[in-house]
Image (tube, rainbow, N blue to C red):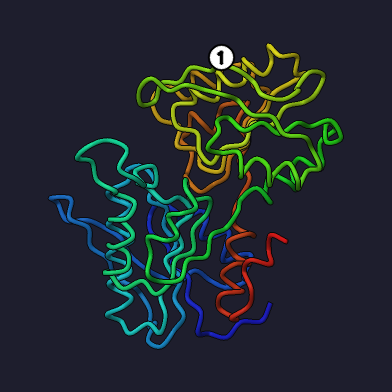
């Protein structure tokens, strides 16, 4: 690939490995930056090369520890703005606070909107995000947002499996039906839905499976795995309805609390995740978990943004 020197790709500490993969895809070197902290924890940043008049892409997931990585991204944006970058695109493989996207109880914030305001106020000109928890979060921004659908990464992998001709895609809840339907259309597979009730945060109870899964290999699709409680209960319900096997696909491996234990003890045969969030050594060692990289997808989106080409056509 031929690129002019006016593109610069920098990384925060949450996405260093992913950024290396993106730059390898683009056949460029990652731009130099130093992210460190004072003894009291205050973050400091220095960009190590000239970016005046350049098209700058800052890559950092707001993954755990969420607040530190969010501040890193905000300070990187401010540093790039003050260094006279021509355009700044915040590349956010995992958008933290996305689950707080509405007032579902009295006197609670809409933190996803707050984060959008912070990114814009810091100086971002554009956002590139992957599988937002709710697509309407794009409307929280007053700057352009390119929203990437990571299901194309799972498509490529699943097409190579022996079970490809006998898949049924299952939505783990009614809120994910649109995402699952699109994925099922890509695979040419039927769709089923898990009806669930959630009595409290991070606690779910599976009630019923809507659709036929008997004699088929089920693929559960979701945007993230947090404690994996929902995933494990959904998998058990699907298996109880006669599915031959159950595997899961989720873009963002948050893996908090008992997630790894839940996955290990579950009937899931495989859990496919992306590298939007770096895995812990324990997660990397789990034989059920397989990581697929987002680097080519994000890299191609960056190339198209830089060249003023269509990003949406990636998913047609």
Which quadrant does the N terminus fall into? Answer: bottom right
Drawn side of residue 57 relative to residue 82, left or right: right
- Name, please, the residue furthest toward the left: 40
Position of the C terminus, as image quadrant, is: bottom right
Q: At 68% across and 51% down in the image, what residue appears?
A: 152
Q: What x and y, as percent, mark residue 285?
A: 55, 29
Q: Which residue is mark 1?
A: 265
Residue 273, how many percent across, how many down?
Answer: 58, 39
Q: Is residue 76 left or right of residue 179?
A: left
Residue 52 location (% of width, % of height)? 37, 86
In this picture, residue 6 sits left or right of residue 77: right
Q: Position of residue 290 (x, y in %)?
A: 63, 36
Foreground of the two, 185 or 159? 185
Image quadrant in which you'd find residue 65: top left
User: In the image, what residue occupies the spot 23% across and 41% down?
Assistant: 108
Nearest to the observer: residue 30 or residue 213: 213
At x 61%, y 74%, the residue is 304
Q: Is residue 165 above or below residue 42?
A: above
- Write the residue at 49% across / 18% down: 261
Residue 10 appears in which quarter of the rendering?
bottom left
Q: Residues within 10 Å of mark 1 (few under 14, many from 20)?
A: few
């Amino acid at each position: 690939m031929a690129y002019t020197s006016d593109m610069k790709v920098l990384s925060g500490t949450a996405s260093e490995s992913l950024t290396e993969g993106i730059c390898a895809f683009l056949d460029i070197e990652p731009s130099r930056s130093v992210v460190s902290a004072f003894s009291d924890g205050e973050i400091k940043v220095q960009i190590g090369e000239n970016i005046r008049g350049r098209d700058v892409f800052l890559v950092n997931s707001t993954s755990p520890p969420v607040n530190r990585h969010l501040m890193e991204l905000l300070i990187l944006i401010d540093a790039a703005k003050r260094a006279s970058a021509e355009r700044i695109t915040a590349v956010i493989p995992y958008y933290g606070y996305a689950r707080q996207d509405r007032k579902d109880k009295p006197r609670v914030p809409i933190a996803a909107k707050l984060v959008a305001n912070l990114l814009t106020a810091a100086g971002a000109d554009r956002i590139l995000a992957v599988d937002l928890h709710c697509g309407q979060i794009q409307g929280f921004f007053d700057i352009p947002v390119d929203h990437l659908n990571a299901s194309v990464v799972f498509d490529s992998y699943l097409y190579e499996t022996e079970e490809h001709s006998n898949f049924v895609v299952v939505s783990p809840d009614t809120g994910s039906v649109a995402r699952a339907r699109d994925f099922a259309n890509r695979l040419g597979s039927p769709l089923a839905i898990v009806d669930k009730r959630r009595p409290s945060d991070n606690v779910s109870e599976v009630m019923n499976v809507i659709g036929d899964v008997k004699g088929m290999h089920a693929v559960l699709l979701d945007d993230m795995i947090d404690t994996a409680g929902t995933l494990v209960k959904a998998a058990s319900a699907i298996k109880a309805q006669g599915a031959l096997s159950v595997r899961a696909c989720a873009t963002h491996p948050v893996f908090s609390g008992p997630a790894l234990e839940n996955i290990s003890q579950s009937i899931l045969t495989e859990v496919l995740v992306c590298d939007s969030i770096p895995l812990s050594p324990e997660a990397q060692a789990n034989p059920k978990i397989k990581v697929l990289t987002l680097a080519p997808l994000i890299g191609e989106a960056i190339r198209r943004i830089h060249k003023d080409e269509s990003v949406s056509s990636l998913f047609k």
